[in-house]
Image (cartoon, rainbow, N blue to C red):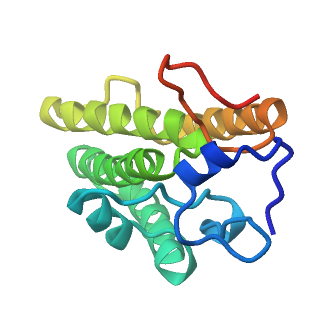
Amino acid sequence: MYVSKAPFNEKAESQHLTATRVADGEARRALWGWSPPPLPAQTAWARRVDRFAPRTGLRCLAFLVGIVALLSIAPHLVTRGQLVVEGIAFLASGGWCALNFWRCRQAHCLISGGGWLGLSFLSFIETGLGHSVINGYEQPVFLGVLAIGVAFEGTWYLRRGDNIVRFGATGQSTAR
C-alpha cells in the first residue's frame, strides 16, 4: 500500500480523498497503486469521466495496449496514414492524461497531458500538409514527453513526498 512521506494534513486529504478511504486512513489508489484517487466528483461531467477513463485493471491495460498497437502500426502506413494514426494515439494518450490530471492531480499528467495533446495537434496539421515537419520524429518526441513527465513526477515525489499536485488559493503548491 502507498505510504506518503508528507505529514498528514486532514484538510488537504479530505478535499482530495473520496469515499475510497479505508480503515487505516489511507486511500485506495488506481493504476496498481501509482495513481492517486480521484477528487470528489461534484459534476455530471466529472462522474462521466470517472466512469469512462480507464484507471486500473484490464481496461487500463487494454487502453495502453491499444496505444502501443497504434504506434506500432503507424510506420507501416503511407505518410498521411502514419501521421493520422499517430495523431489519434497522441490525442488518446494526451486526453487520458489531461483528464487524469483534472481528476487526480497526478504530477506526470501535468507534463504528458499537455505535451501529447500538443503533439497530436502537430500531427494532425502535418496530416493536412502531407508530410512531417519534424522529419518523422513524432514517436521519439512522444517517448521524450513520457520521459520528461515521469522525471518530473519522480522529482516531485522526492521533493514533496507524494505524486499529487495540490494548489492553494494563491496557486502555490500546498505540499511541503
Q: Nearer the viewer, residue 154 or 137?
A: 154
Q: Residue at x 68, y 48 (%)?
A: 10
Instruction: Quadrant for the C terminus, please.
Output: top right
Q: Splitting the image into 4 quarters, where does residue 140 fall?
A: top right
Give the residue furthest to the left. Answer: 128
Question: x%, y% of residue 112?
Answer: 50, 39
Left or right: 176, with 164 as reference point? right
Give residue 3's position: percent from left, percent from top. 83, 58
Residue drawn at 59 percent across, 36 percent down: 165
Is the residue 124 above or below the residue 31 in the image? above
Q: Is residue 30 rendered to the left or right of residue 125? A: right
Q: Position of residue 58 (x, y in %)?
A: 52, 83
Q: Residue at x 51, y 35 (%)?
A: 110
Quarter of the image for residue 52 reads bottom left
Q: Residue furthest bottom?
A: 58
Q: Position of residue 92 (x, y in %)?
A: 34, 55
Q: Is residue 154 above or below residue 99?
A: above
